[in-house]
Image (spheres, rainbow, N blue to C red):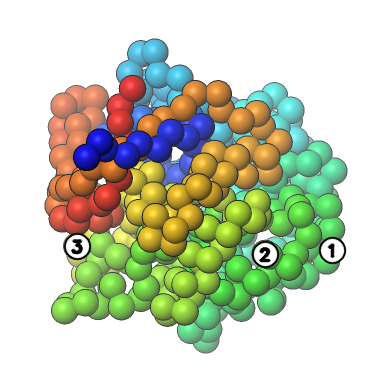
Amino acid sequence: MPSQQLSLRQPDDWHVHLRDGSMLQAVALATARQFARAIVMPNLSPPVTTAAAAEAYRRRIREALPDGSRFEPLLTAYLTDAIDPAEIERGFRQGAWVACKLYPAHATTNSAAGVSSIEAITPVFETLERIGMPLLIHGEVTSADIDIFDREAVFIERHLEPLLGRHPGLKVVLEHITTSDAVDFVRSGPANLAATITPHHLHINRNAMFAGGLRPDFYCLPVAKRELHRIALRGAATSGNPKFFLGTDSAPHARTAKEAACGCAGIFNAPFALESYAAVFEQENALERLEAFASEFGPRFYGLPLNEATITLERQPLEVPSRLHLNDAAGTAVELVPFHAGETLPWRLLQP
Ligand SMILES: NC(=O)N[C@@H](CC(=O)O)C(=O)O
Ligand SMILES: [Zn+2]
Ligand SMILES: [Zn+2]
């Protein structure tokens, strides 16, 4: 039987962590071999809070890729309590960064310098609204009295809805949504509100973290939720609604940092991200909608041109290795566990 192929306009990743230093050198190509562009998260240490730091980071990303790579990193500004709206606007005008990232302080990895009071940085939102610069949000409250599985829904009610009420023209992406509450809120919201959806939240529910023992490789933030939420996310991603688009939230941590008494949050899905999404769209009988989700809705929301290049997926089993040893520039291997470790996926990306 001839193999089936699926050609798509080349996609972009609208939410990824490329890290820095040897981790950046180890993981950058995994993203650049599939995606033309990516929105690169600024939660480095120290975080990317100045246009100069963003330009320097862009150069380090380019240096981590082979000569001739056409991958385009789209950088983001990390909002702090003290960030100067004028610096944000200057960096936006000069092309240093394309969006701002809001981490509530202590919500996730490297967010200690994040925003402690959303209301207190109103001048930042006024600037973003005026210049048309998107605000990307890690939408979780951090109060200890709120159950970890409720943090996204409570954030929407307490912070996001009032924020949109105060700034109706603000372009907002609610990142890596994990609940039916988020799906409903984004779907019924204005056109300037969108959301990214990760492959892992389409594949796993919260049971994955506890299947036969504690499984740190399935721990990320926002944490995976109940099955009913996973089903809602699959419905949103495959619906053809342009408010929902691809953002992997690939968040590599060395294996030793995941498998620890206090393991880091984050799932490294970059190596087989497209194959992971393709499996979901096939299971939902929606392969014809994969291209719009992966390659059209994101650039349209950001006001960027669609990519001209195409990529091809082939319906051939892909065995995902249980471990990856990826080299940094010095040839030292970083050991990482990829999402779908040890599983077989139905589609594989053909290299051009
Ligand atoms: N998603 C995660 O679990 N972790 C991300 C941070 C984030 O996106 O919240 C990371 O930087 O490790
Ligand atoms: Zn996040
Ligand atoms: Zn992230």
Task: Tell me if residue 236 comes above or below residue 5 in the rendering.
Answer: below
Q: Amino acid at mark 1?
A: Arg
| Residue in the picture at 76% in, 54% down | 191
Q: Which residue is mark 3?
A: 259
| Residue in the picture at 42% in, 45% down | 17
- Percent from the top left, x then y, of residue 61? 42, 28
- Percent from the top left, x then y, of residue 345? 25, 51
- Percent from the top left, x then y, of residue 308? 55, 23
* Lower position in the chain sequence, tag 1 or tag 3: 1
Q: Amino acid at mark 3?
A: Glu
Q: In the image as oriented, which residue stretches furthest toward the top? A: 68
Q: Mark 2–mark 3 contact, CB under 8 Å?
A: no
Residue 186 marker? 2
Q: Residues within 10 Å of mark 3 (few under 14, many from 20)?
A: some
Which of the 4 image quarters holds residue 213? bottom left
| Residue in the picture at 52% in, 80% down | 150
Q: Secondary structure at mark 3?
A: loop
Q: Mark 1–mark 2 contact, CB under 8 Å?
A: no
Q: Nearer the viewer, residue 102 or 323?
A: 323
Q: Work out whether residue 39 can be spotted.
A: no
Task: Tell me if residue 248 comes above or below residue 35 in the rendering.
Answer: below
Q: In the image as oriented, which residue stretches furthest toward the bottom? A: 145
- Percent from the top left, x then y, of residue 126? 83, 50
* Lower position in the chain sequence, tag 2 or tag 3: 2
Q: Which residue is mark 1?
A: 166
Q: Secondary structure at mark 2?
A: helix
Marks 1 and 3 sit apart, C-alpha to C-alpha, by 43 Å
- Residue 306 relative to residue 256: left or right: right
Q: Secondary structure at mark 1?
A: helix
